[in-house]
């Protein structure tokens, strides 16, 4: 594997998880965030993610890896559409179900995800519009990075062993969500496996981008409203929601 690919993988697997965890802890320690501060978090995340994509595309182009090899292609539209719907419907249903169960818990029992949603998810129209831009950026950039670059790099490094690309890219993706704790990392790993399998089966990032966008969008827009609902005891559950982070 080229040295620059190794360096990028190190940044994605070590620096990004560490920095994301530190940043989220800092934000959660603040008593409250204003609209300007929340939008600034979204904007800085958008800028970082596009910068990361620019670096990845720069280095893959230097090694004569075209965007089609990264999954920016649509070789089979009917299959891509079928896989997209097959993934999107159950993941969205699970997301809404998990948020509703979380909302029935008392706030003090909602744990990290409840605190994260109340602190960082959009609370008004201006923040919601900015969050849509964030969700779109995260969907495109993280899929290009993890199901595009990481998948392709691991597939080549393993001599064409598809399972290594699927599992390895899912593991790297879950590490980027280390700030969510062990349950969040596990849930993200499972979602990463499903998305990587979809990318391998269809040869396209399109299902991954679409599913990623709508799952994050529903989480971001629904969580603040649901978590303001009256609480009633229920067993805790985990959600696959993503949240703004420092890195991809």
Image (tube, rainbow, N blue to C red):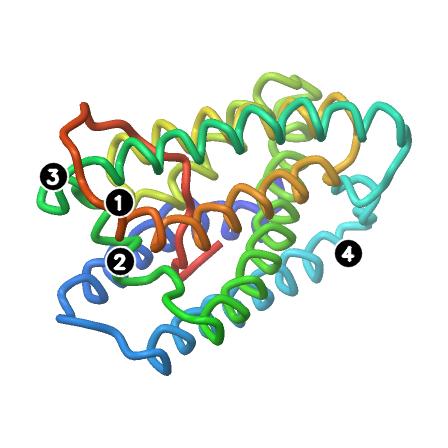
Q: Label 4 vs label 2: CA separation?
A: 41 Å
**Residue neighbourhood size for the residue with mark 4, other residues' Cα within 10 Å, grouped as few (<14), some (14–19), many (≥20):** few
Query: Residue at label 3?
Result: 109
- Determine which of the numbered discs, if any, sits on residue 8 in the image: none
Q: Residue visible at 53% across and 33% down?
A: 92
Position of residue 79 measured from the top left corner of the image (x, y, whole percent): 84, 23
Q: Secondary structure at mark 4?
A: helix
117 or 9, which is in the foreground?
117
Mark 3 in CB contact with mark 1 (< 8 angstroms): no
Q: Label 2 vs label 1: CA separation?
A: 9 Å
Q: Which label lies toward us, 2 or 1? A: 2
Q: Secondary structure at mark 2?
A: helix
Mark 4 in CB contact with mark 3 (< 8 angstroms): no
Q: Label 2 vs label 3: CA separation?
A: 13 Å
Q: Residue visible at 71% across and 24% down?
A: 200
- Determine which of the numbered discs, if any, sits on residue 118 in the image: 2
Q: Residue visible at 62% across and 38% down?
A: 211
N-term mark: 4 or 3:
4
Query: Residue at label 4?
Result: 61
N-term mark: 2 or 3:
3
Q: Label 1 vs label 4: CA separation?
A: 38 Å
196 or 99, which is in the foreground?
99
Q: Secondary structure at mark 1?
A: helix
N-term mark: 2 or 1:
1
Query: Residue at label 1?
Result: 113
Q: Which label lies toward us, 4 or 3? A: 3
Q: Label 3 vs label 1: CA separation?
A: 10 Å
């Amino acid at each position: 594997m080229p040295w620059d690919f190794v360096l990028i993988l190190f940044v994605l697997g070590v620096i990004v998880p560490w920095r994301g965890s530190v940043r989220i802890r800092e934000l959660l320690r603040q008593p409250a965030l204003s609209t300007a501060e929340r939008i600034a978090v979204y904007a800085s995340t958008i800028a970082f993610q596009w910068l990361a994509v620019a670096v990845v595309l720069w280095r893959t182009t230097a090694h004569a890896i075209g965007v089609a090899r990264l999954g920016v292609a649509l070789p089979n539209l009917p299959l891509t559409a079928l896989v997209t719907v097959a993934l999107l419907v159950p993941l969205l249903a699970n997301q809404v179900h998990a948020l509703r169960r979380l909302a029935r818990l008392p706030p003090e029992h909602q744990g990290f995800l409840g605190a994260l949603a109340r602190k960082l998810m959009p609370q008004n129209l201006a923040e919601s519009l900015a969050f849509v831009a964030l969700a779109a950026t995260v969907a495109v950039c993280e899929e290009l990075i993890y199901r595009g670059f990481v998948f392709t790099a691991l597939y080549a490094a393993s001599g064409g062993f598809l399972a290594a690309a699927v599992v390895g890219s899912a593991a790297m993706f879950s590490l980027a969500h280390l700030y969510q704790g062990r349950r969040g990392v596990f849930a993200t790993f499972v979602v990463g496996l499903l998305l990587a399998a979809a990318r391998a089966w269809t040869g396209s990032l399109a299902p991954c981008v679409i599913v990623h966008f709508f799952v994050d969008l529903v989480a971001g827009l629904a969580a603040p409203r649901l978590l303001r609902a009256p609480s009633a005891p229920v067993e805790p559950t985990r959600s696959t929601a993503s949240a703004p982070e420092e890195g991809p």
